Image: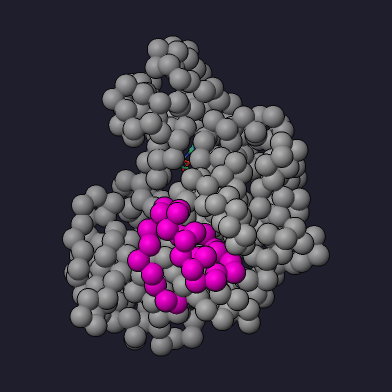
Amino acid sequence: MRILLIGGGGREHALAWKLRQSAHCQTLYAAPGNAGIAQVAECVPLAAKAIPDIVAFAKRNAIDLVVVGPESPLIAGLADALQEAHILCFGPSRAAAQLEGSKAFAKQILAEVGAPTAPFAVFDDPDAARSYLRTRFLEHPCVIKADGEALGKGVFVCETLSDALEAVEFLMVERGLGTAGTRIVVEDRLYGREMSLLCLTDGQTALPMPPVRDYKRALDGDRGPNTGGMGCYTPLPDATPALIEAALRQIVRPVISEMARRGTPYRGVLYAGLMIQDDQPYTLEFNCRFGDPETQVLMPLLEGDLVELALATIEGRLHETSVRFAPRAAVCVVLASGGYPHEYRTGLPIEGLEQAIESPNVLVFHAGTRTENGQIVTAGGRVLNIVGLGDTVAQARENAYRAVQQIRFEGMHYREDIAAHG
Ligand code: AMP
Ligand code: GLY
C-alpha cells in the first residue's frame, strides 16, 4: 500500500517506524515529517492542517491509506475530506473528533451516558461563570477549561477563587486564547493519579492498549510549567485488570455506543485521559488520536501489524482482531531545548545520536529536528524522545537514561525522575 502519515513530531516518528515494519507498506510519505522520520519515509512539505493540499497530494500520488497523528486536521474534517475522495483514513470524522474538539461536548456525552467524570457546568457568559464559581468554591476547588481547541493551553487547575476568576477574565473577557475560550467548562477538581488509556475502536468494539503515565510538568517532582509532555512509561503498577475493565465498562464503551447511536460513530484511536481517585477511574478528557509521548512507548511494544490494525478499525472488523503488546516495559525521556516550554533557540547541532542507538534496547524518536548541511540540528521545543526497553520498568528506565547521557546539544534539558516512583 501507499501510505501517507500526517504530522512531524515524536509520535509520528514512532508511527512511521512501526508502519515501515508492515508487510503492507510499500511506500511511506510523511507530511511534514522531521529529520528522524526522513530516515524511514519520504517527507513532503505540507502542513498537517492544509486539508485541500493533503487531499490533492493523496489523489495525485495514489495514496491508499492516510494515518493522522495530530488532532487539528481531524477536528477540522480531514477524515471526511479523504472519505469524499475515496481514500482510507485512520482517524475519526469531524463529528466524532468533537470529543476532543469541544470539552463541553465531551462532558455532555459523559453526563448523558452516566460515565464517571467531575461535576461540571458550561458557560457562555462571564458573569454567570463568576457567580457559579463564587458559590462552588465555598465547597470545592474548580478547574476552568476553554471549550475549544487550545493546544494544551486551555486548562487552569485553580487553587483559589481568585485564580479561577482570573482564568475567566483571561479566557472570556480578554479572549487570551481567541475563540477557544468564548465558552468555558467549569468542573470540580479531582485528586489522584493520572493515566492515559488509549483504545482502538471501529465504532463498536474497543481494544485497549496498556495504560501509560505521562509527565506533563517541565521539572522533576512535577514542578514548573505544563509542557506537551516530558516523558512517560508503561506498564503501570496501579493499572490493574479490574481498573482497566472498569474504565472500559463505565466510560469507553458507553461513549462509543452513544456516538454510534447519534449517527456519528467513532473510528480511530480514542484516548481517555483518566484520573484514578479512590481506585475509581474518572474521565478528565478525551483525545481523538494517539498520545504524544504515549505512542513512543506503545509502538515499540505493539506486536503485530499497525496497517492491519488501522484497516480493521476503518472497516469495522475489530471484533475479529486482537491487539497484542509484548509483556515488557518501555520508558520515554524527552530531551527539550533550553528554555522550553518558554522561548528557546533552534538550529543547534545534536551530537551522539549514533552512539545512543547502539543498544538494542534503545530507540530514538525525533520530535523537533531538521537536517542542515548534513547535520541534524534542533528545530523545536521538544527535540528527541529517548525510549529504553526492558523486562521491567527499572531496566527500561536504566536503558533510557544511559542513552540520554550520550546525547548532547546546547541547553538540553530533561526530567531525571521519569518512571522513578511508580
Ligand atoms: P485536560 O486537557 O482536560 O486533560 O486537562 C489537562 C490537565 O489538567 C490534565 O491532564 C490534568 O492534569 C489537569 N486536569 C484537568 N481536569 C482536571 C480536574 N477535574 N481535576 C484535576 N486536574 C485536572
Ligand atoms: N500526552 C498528552 C497528549 O497527547 O495529549
In which quarter of the view is residue 150 placed?
Answer: top left
Looking at the image, which residue is at 45% across and 26% down? 183
Can residue 278 be seen here? The reply is yes
Q: Position of residue 40 (x, y in %)?
A: 45, 79
Q: In the shown orientation, is residue 142 left or right of residue 304?
A: left
Looking at the image, which residue is at 71% across and 36% down? 262
The magenta segment is 41-68
Q: Position of residue 301 (x, y in %)?
A: 59, 72
In which quarter of the view is residue 370 placed?
Answer: bottom left
Q: In the shown orientation, is residue 285 left or right of residue 36?
A: right
Residue 92 part of the magenta segment = no
Q: In the shown orientation, is residue 360 left or right of residue 227?
A: right
Q: Quadrant of the N terminus?
A: bottom right
In which quarter of the view is residue 205 placed?
Answer: bottom right
**In front: 106, or 301?**
106
Q: Position of residue 35 (x, y in %)?
A: 34, 74
Residue that extends furthest to the front in the rendered view of this protein: 60
Q: Is residue 70 above or below residue 57?
A: above
Can residue 327 be seen here? The reply is no
Q: Position of residue 410 (x, y in %)?
A: 19, 69
Tell me how many marks there are.
0
**In front: 48, or 345?**
48
**In front: 58, or 306?**
58
Residue that extends furthest to the right in the rendered view of this protein: 320
Q: In the shown orientation, is residue 59 left or right of residue 318?
A: left
Q: Is residue 141 above or below residue 382?
A: above
**In front: 67, or 280?**
67
Colouring: one colour
Residue 61 part of the magenta segment = yes
Looking at the image, which residue is at 56% across and 81% down? 26
